[in-house]
Amino acid sequence: MSRQLTDAELEAYFDEALPAEEMARLEEQLRLDASLRERLAGLISLRDAGTHSLGAIWRRHRLSCPTREQFGGYLLGTLDEAAREYVEFHVTVAGCSLCSANLADLRRQRAESADAIQTRRRKYFQSSAGYLRKG
Amino acid sequence: MPVDFVSQFDRVLIERVRAADAEAWNELIGRYEGRLLAFVESRLGNRATSEDVVQETFIGLLTSLPNFDGGRPLESYLFSIAAHKLTDQLRRAGRRPTVPLQPTGASSSGWDVAGQQQGASTMLRSGERRHLEEAALVRALAGEIERWRQRGDWEKLKCAELLFVRGRANKEAAQQLGLSEQTVANYKFEFLARLRAALGKLKLPPDVFSELQA
């Protein structure tokens, strides 16, 4: 990637919001380029100081993300053409990593055994339930 | 008082978890663990380590629950905890570089958000004030997105998403959408003008929305 990265891309990196392969590519760039790290630090400082970034807020509130139900409809082939096209754009072109995760999860649920899922959930529950507190 | 963006279903679930209801906690885990695992595993590529990160995410949710104010959807909050835990893991593995807390020579390194100087109002605002500003921007953005959807203006939605969320430059967005750069520039201008108008009615200080300054 030889072109100049935009501020919004760097912020998306900071939010872990880019597709995995681009996150890895940017990590590599940041490891090698001190001025890029400095630029990112500046953006984080502005955010900490209270400047609102359109992209960060859009992402945080998932403003254009399809719903979980729409992803289900997408996999079942029940969405209309415009909605289906938008789901594909949002995941593959806009590269929403959270929606990619939702879609991957729904796909995996079809393939994974119920026992495997239950074993995993039980492990999460047992390791965390001790932190349940009233209040 | 922060604006509440949590769905009714999640609000009830959180209330029950706050009351130390183990069944509700189990339900919350079942509802969210799969998508969190897919998110983390896409970055780490290792199932066992990814499950550890998800485990830390759930513990992180419970320990931070007293601070969760409903200012964002629960799913988004969980993903942000997972992203933090993931970042820690990537740093430990030497993959994610540490970013200095205070940039040096910042003004000459080109990181300033285009055309902005931080005003006093940016620095001195309270957390509550920031919440209100964010809520106003969310409502303005959501209004625009809904308007595009209602009108079938998918192209404008896709364009704004590529420019502001994905961070593409006008030229790249034009190429990806099969549009002219002029059309992309026109969409961008119209979108920002409508947001400015919506926020202007609320008399919010323009310097806190850096990308909206003319």
Image (cartoon, rainbow, N blue to C red):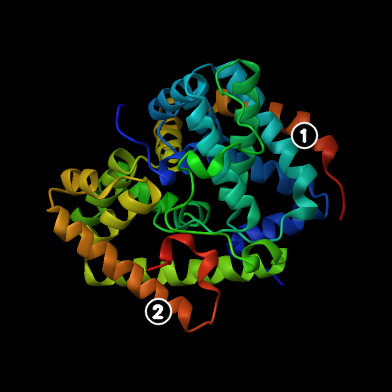
Residue depicted at 62% across the width and 24% down the height: B51
Distance CA(mark 2)–CA(mark 1): 47 Å
Task: Tell me the chain of label 2.
Answer: B
Query: Which amino acid lies under the numbered mark 2 shown in the image of this protein?
Result: Ala
Q: Quadrant of residue B184?
A: bottom left
Foreground residue, B103 or B90? B103
Give left or right: position of A86 versus A22: left
**Helix, strand or loop at mark 2:** helix
Rendering coords of residue B100 (x, y %):
64, 32
Q: Position of residue A35 (x, y in %)?
A: 49, 30
Which residue is denoted by mark 1 in the rendering?
Answer: A128
Give the quadrant of the C terminus of chain A. Answer: bottom right
Q: Nearer the viewer, mark 2 or mark 1?
A: 2
Q: Is residue B38 visible?
A: no
Establish if B122 lies above or below B159: below
User: Would you name the residue on which mark 2 appears?
Assistant: B197
Marked residue chain, label 1: A
Q: Measured along the vertical axis of the image, is residue A113 above or below residue B194?
A: above
Q: Percent from the top left, x then y, of residue B190?
A: 27, 70
Residue located at (57% from left, 28% from top): A117
